[in-house]
Amino acid sequence: MGFKGAWNKRNRLIENPEEYYKLYKRLQRAYKLIREAIKRYGSFELLKGKNTLRDLEELLEERKQVLEMLKKQLKEVHKGKPRIEAEGDEKLKELIREVNKVQAEVRALEIIVNRVRKYEELYAQYKQMTEKKAFVDPKLWV
């Protein structure tokens, strides 16, 4: 914050600097968890251009619908076949691989969406606490 901004807010300090600092640290940790989740679970093709909570939730719902459709197809293909005959079927194996891949994507998206949702809640609290107020380090009060 520049001098002009700080000077305009000089009489509106944050009431509880300790609580502000704790919330700030929680916000940083939440952001770090989001970055780690995206690095670990999110592939570039899956999250391409999706960076808001609403976009991620829409993508999650879409992938859940695809998963349900694939599970129905798997039931139809496997229906009425004995287990031994079904084991050698290449179409069935490919469908099982596809179901497993989509299940992994859904789990990853659920983790990412939950972490982003928690970050959004913390950010709203942080924004409410700091709205039109200035934070001055207590060491500088003297």
Image (cartoon, rainbow, N blue to C red):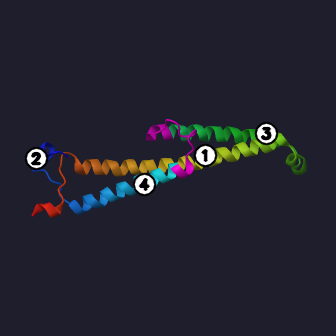
Residue 99 can be seen in this image: yes
Using the numbered discs, state the Cα–Cα distance from disc 2 to disc 1 in whole angstroms: 50 Å
Query: Marks 4 and 3: which is nearer the front?
Result: 4
Marker disc for residue 7: 2
Q: Which residue is mark 1?
A: 105
Residue 116 is situated, as x and y percent measured from the top left of the image, at 44, 48
Precedes in sequence: disc 4 or disc 3: 4
Using the numbered discs, state the Cα–Cα distance from disc 3 to disc 2 in whole angstroms: 70 Å
Residue pushed farthest front?
2
Figure quadrant of the C terminus: bottom left
Q: Which residue is mark 4?
A: 32
Using the numbered discs, state the Cα–Cα distance from disc 1 to disc 3 in whole angstroms: 23 Å
Precedes in sequence: disc 2 or disc 1: 2
Using the numbered discs, state the Cα–Cα distance from disc 4 to disc 1 in whole angstroms: 21 Å
Crowding at mark 1 (Cα within 10 Å: few <14, some 14-19, many 20+): many
Type of residue at label 2?
Answer: Trp
Type of residue at label 3?
Answer: Glu
Q: Which residues are magenta?
A: 39-56
**Secondary-structure class at tag 1:** helix
Q: Would residue 57 be found to the left or right of residue 20 on screen? A: right
Residue 123 is situated, as x and y percent measured from the top left of the image, at 33, 49
Q: Would residue 54 be found to the left or right of residue 70 on screen? A: left
Precedes in sequence: disc 3 or disc 2: 2
Type of residue at label 1?
Answer: Glu
Crowding at mark 4 (Cα within 10 Å: few <14, some 14-19, many 20+): some
